[in-house]
Image (tube, rainbow, N blue to C red):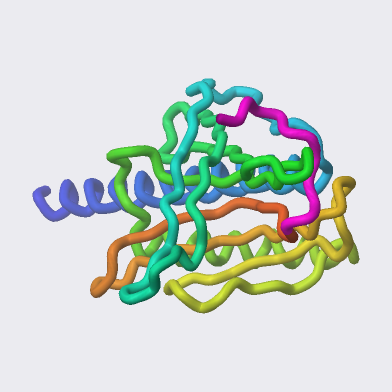
Amino acid sequence: MRRITLSILLNLTLITSAGANEDLSGVWRDLFTRCRIAVETGKDFDATGLRDLGRSVRTVPPITAPGVPFPLLHGYKMAEQRWEVPGSRFVVVEAEYPPDGGKSRRSCKLELAQGAEPISTEEEKLLRATFFVERDDLLSTGRHEYWNPDPLFSTNLGIRLAGNNPYGCRVVSFLDIDTRSHSQSFFQTGSAEQDAACGAAPRFTHP
């Protein structure tokens, strides 16, 4: 009887775990697609079903080097809008770079909520496999091309819009994860406009 009970409990645990993984994958793909479509088309982000966390300003410090009397890259402030995903570990962060010539480049990313459990190695494999399916679907349309970010993490995957979006920007979409034991866990995914001279009129109020 005890063996039967343990077997039932083990099966229930595996089913529950599989269900959680499938949900993680499904939520990721839905939000990733919303971000990608918003940045590629220049339209507003579809926040249907998400909880509005409001807008804020994030300060990006300058990059310096020992012995160099000036910053290698100047610091700046990013205007951000955040949405919370009820029942999920994900937070959507839409951001704009400081306006340049009346234009602001835009990004839309998924991050883990503060205090959320890090992505595990098994979840990394699941999200990587889901990204491959999504990328194959996009490549088959002929409107996207291969593009991979620099190999900095244990997962470095991407895809790029074959042409420019309506505001003259190249748009890349990516999945970056690091679950290696010798480094801090890292997760970031989403879409972003590239090229400094592109962008639309700012949507957010900038400091």
Q: Toward which corner of the image does residue 69 lie, by quadrant?
A: bottom left
Asked whether, in this view, residue 20 is left or right of residue 33, the answer is left
- Left/right placement of residue 206 relative to residue 119 reads right
Residue at figure coordinates x 48%, y 67% from the top left:
72
Q: Is 109 included in the stretch rendered in magenta?
A: no
Judge whether residue 199 is colored magenta: yes
Mainly helix, strand or loop, the magenta region? Answer: loop
**Picture residue at 79% right of the left edge, 55% below the top:** 197
Residue range highlighted in magenta:
196-207
Specify the quadrant of the image occupied by residue 130: bottom right
Residue 181 in the image: x percent, y percent?
A: 25, 71
Residue at 64% from the left image edge and 46% from the top image edge: 107
Q: Return the x and y of residue 17 as percentages of the image width and height.
A: 36, 49
Please determine whether, in this image, residue 206 is positioned above or below residue 168. Answer: above
Q: Residue at x 68, y 44 (%)?
A: 106
Q: Quadrant of residue 71?
A: bottom left
